[in-house]
Image (tube, rainbow, N blue to C red):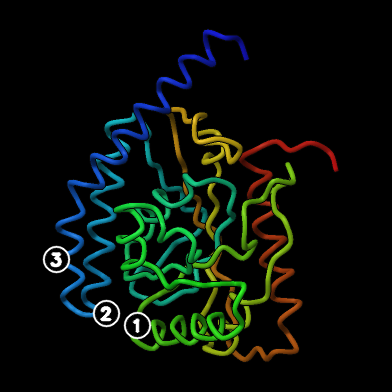
Amino acid sequence: MGPIKKGLLFVFSIYALITFIIVMLLVFPFAMLAATAGKIRGGNLVYRCCRVWAQLWYYTIGVLHEEIYEHPHDTSRQYIFVANHISYMDIPPIVLAIHQPIRALGKYEMIKVPVFGWIYKAAVILVNRQNATKRAQSVRALKAAIKNNISIIIFPEGTFNETRQPLKSFFDGAFRIAIETQTPIKPLLLVDTLKRLHYRSVFEMTPGLNRVVYLEEVPVKGLTMEDLPALKDRVYKIMEAGLKRYNSYPTP
């Protein structure tokens, strides 16, 4: 990358970060008010505020949201959504693409970010992977959301995929909860977020298309814990094949 292009990229990234903060501050009072409506209704309203934030921010920085439905999707049904995880830009498209009550499993460390951290805490189910008791509490909270007719979304890779391959290995959590609650899995693909913001630096943000792809539903009815490895492998292969349809990857 030449020095001129690198300089322009840096300037745009600064602009995008400034607008991120401004839009977040504009939405913050409404999200704070929404949270007072209770854990369920309030949480749903906070997500609506987050949608407004994402739409406004995308508009100011020239990012275009697009949803691709390779298979039909029924928003009246509950799902455990799973998505690949490769960038901090994974959050806005998820907020924009899911048009039904939803709770995300999020990293505890993110609540330390000023303003954003408060909204993040109100909108997600926090997980502290370093504490077994906290992890168990997170699982119970996810199951409680499902009992209240709220779908959940989990990044089964756990952390950013920095392998240069479509996916890194999956943790069991999403698939265990799917089997235990008999809730079908709906895989989503985030195919452009690495182009919009690379995980190596917040100063590599670019405008452009940011697509979310809906893949086929994976049913779990009748499955038991003995089926967990096969279920996880099936979802992995579906998502891996899907990512390869939209992006090119180096030969392993």
Against 152, residue 109 (above or below) is above
Residue 33, label in figure: 3
- Image quadrant for the N terminus? top right
Q: Nearer the viewer, residue 79 or 61?
A: 61
Crowding around mark 3 (Cα neighbors within 10 Å: few <14, some 14 to 19, many 20+) is few
Against 121, residue 68 (above or below) is above
Give the alpha-carbon distance from disc 3 to disc 1, as whole Å: 23 Å
Residue 149, label in figure: 1
* Amino acid identity at mark 2: Ile
Crowding around mark 2 (Cα neighbors within 10 Å: few <14, some 14 to 19, many 20+) is some
Which is more N-terminal, label 2 or label 3? 3
Give the alpha-carbon distance from disc 2 to disc 1, as whole Å: 10 Å
- Give the structural element (helix, strand or loop) at label 1: loop
Crowding around mark 1 (Cα neighbors within 10 Å: few <14, some 14 to 19, many 20+) is some
Q: Are marks 3 and 2 in contact (CB under 8 Å)?
A: no
- Image quadrant for the C terminus? top right
Residue 40, label in figure: 2
x and y, in percent, of residue 84 in the image: 59, 55
